Image (spheres, rainbow, N blue to C red):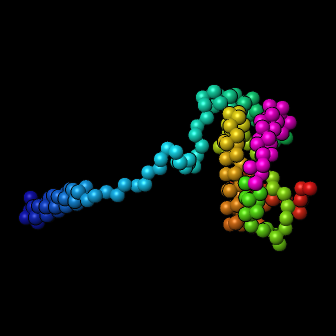
Amino acid sequence: MSTTSRILIITVFVAVVGMATAFFWLDSQRSSEPSVNPPTVSESESVPRRYRPDPVSREAKESVDDILRRHRGMSKEELQRSPELNKFMNRFIAVLNTPELAAKIEERIAALPPGKAGEQGMIRMDLDMLDDARGRAWLEAAVSEDSQRMEDWVLNTLDGAIFEFALDPEMERTSEGVSLQRGAVVP
């Protein structure tokens, strides 16, 4: 081994040992500093800890899986004619017709940016597929008969539409199936 190789090996060894020592020394300095504890939320406060809803029960998941199997391969028109799915849609409509949710929906609709020349219109929320994440979340909410889960699904979908329409007011339909039918005002 040449002298240059020996010097290079010794230099690399000293650099590695020096870096390791510095790393452990800095780590020990950090741990001796008092840490700042994040604010805690008491159990009495009802602050959601995450955006995603809690998982549904195993029975509800199995029921949803069975429904998806029965409706696999159906067209949008066939899905709309399904008595089973219409029963679930009626559950959603009952929740939508509550005064509390109607007020929240009106707030979201008012937050939608004006589109083509500020035209008024009607909002449509289409479900093209049941087996994608959005369709499954809708079905899980309906099967579980959890009105809060149904409300959250509707409001989250509208919040997403507000965001997407704000980015592109000329958009016809959002990625979650919300569309504005301009000029079609519901009496």
Q: Residue at x 52, y 45 (%)?
A: 44
Range of magenta residues? 78-103
Locate residue 55 relative to residue 183 in the image: left or right. left
In the image, residue 29 lies in the stretch drawn in magenta? no
Q: Quadrant of residue 38?
A: bottom left
Of 171 and 118, which appears nearest the observer?
Answer: 118
Q: Main secondary structure of the magenta part?
A: helix
In the image, residue 102 lies in the stretch drawn in magenta? yes
Q: Position of residue 135 (x, y in %)?
A: 70, 42
Could one spot residue 80 in this view of the protein?
yes
Of 5 and 163, which appears nearest the observer?
Answer: 163
Q: Position of residue 65 (x, y in %)?
A: 67, 30
Q: Position of residue 133 (x, y in %)?
A: 65, 43
Q: Residue at x 31, y 57 (%)?
A: 35
Locate residue 31 relative to residue 9 in the image: left or right. right
Q: Quadrant of residue 78?
A: top right
Of 154 and 168, which appears nearest the observer?
Answer: 154
Quadrant where the image shows the C terminus? bottom right
Q: Position of residue 53 (x, y in %)?
A: 60, 43
Q: Residue at x 70, y 66 (%)?
A: 166
